Image (cartoon, rainbow, N blue to C red):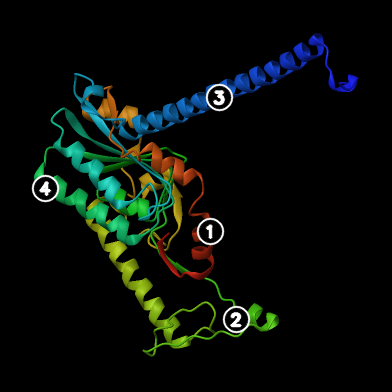
Amino acid sequence: MDNPQDMKRPEDSSREWKLIEKVLLDAQGEQKRSRRWGIFFKSLTFIYLFSLLWLIRMPGEHAAEMLPEENYAAVIEINGVIAADQDANADSIIGSLRDAFEDDKALGVILRINSPGGSPVQSGYVYDEIKRLKETRPDFPVYAVIMDLGASGAYYIAAAADEIYADKASLVGSIGVVGSGFGFTGIMEKLGIERRQYTAGKHKGFLDPFQPENAEEKAFWQGVLQVTHNQFIEQVKNGRGDRLKLDTPDLFSGLVWSGEQAVEIGLIDGLSSTSRLARDKLGTEELVNFTFQPSPWDEVLRKLGASMGKGIATLLTEQTLTLR
């Protein structure tokens, strides 16, 4: 005789099957939802990558299709520190200058400057290229307009222009050179840190911040700074000519002057703005920005701060030569 416990009523079996069916349907629904979310995120990733590619391939500010039909003033901005790894680097500025000089609809170039200066090498490259380009197109004027600050290497570049203008409160000049660094010998002694450096060559460890300062090397370095300063002074004299008041006390000492003072001593030619200069000197209201624009991808990487650690390490350990 069968055990009554082993016997199930039809309604019990029906409930079990319905439960199994519900579990299977729920699992199937979960799989469908997972597939939908997967498709959604894949589509989102595709749209993001496509948009990024479009931004990278996006034309620059002075692409031909964006230029006005009438003639215009070509504006090139020099902002921030002038250095090879900064936006204001010689390659970018020179590329923009060449584009402007080759443009038949450009009436002239206005360098819009707001910079404390920087590398004498980068500034020298730009200065020399402006002079060279002016020889290829003598009737194409180059003006410089100093905004808040046009100091040191920035003024070096401005001196190559036909004329320089600024606001009455702008800071202009700082014709000097500085070599900067740090010395860590005292703190190393306190921390019990020993510097071990192996070189071949008497001065190969020249200006090592972890070694005591050497009087002979200090004198040599001062000589390098003086030679660079003399080069700077000579280029300013060549660029400004008779307009420069050479009898001005401390003219080449590294001091800065206001725009109003700079007019009096011949560092600049007058007080004006970019728009006013375009109207008065070039006879146009149209301004076209020829400044080199880095790709959006480069901007994203830069803003992520990938080079922050490198910058801090360089600041602490590397000797730098800067026009200030």
Coordinates of residue 70 in the picture (x, y in percent): 19, 19
Q: Which residue is mark 4?
A: 135
Location of the C terminus by quadrant is bottom left
Label whose residue precedes the other's in the sequence (1 or 4): 4
Q: Dot 2 corresponds to which residue?
A: 185
Foreground residue among 35 and 249: 35
Q: Residue at x 36, y 51 (%)?
A: 154
Q: Rate crowding at label 3 as few (under 14), some (14 to 19) or many (20 or more) other CA atoms within 10 Å.
A: few
Identify the residue position indicated by label 3 in the image.
Answer: 37
Count of numbered labels shown in the rendering: 4
Residue 189 visible within the image: yes
**Percent of width and height locating residue 173:** 40, 53
At 48% across and 54% down in the image, what residue appears?
A: 307
Q: Amino acid at mark 2?
A: Thr
Location of residue 289 (image quadrant): top left
Choose the circle earlier in sequence order: 3 or 2: 3
The residue that disc 1 covers is: 309
Q: Earlier in the sequence, mark 1 or mark 2?
A: 2
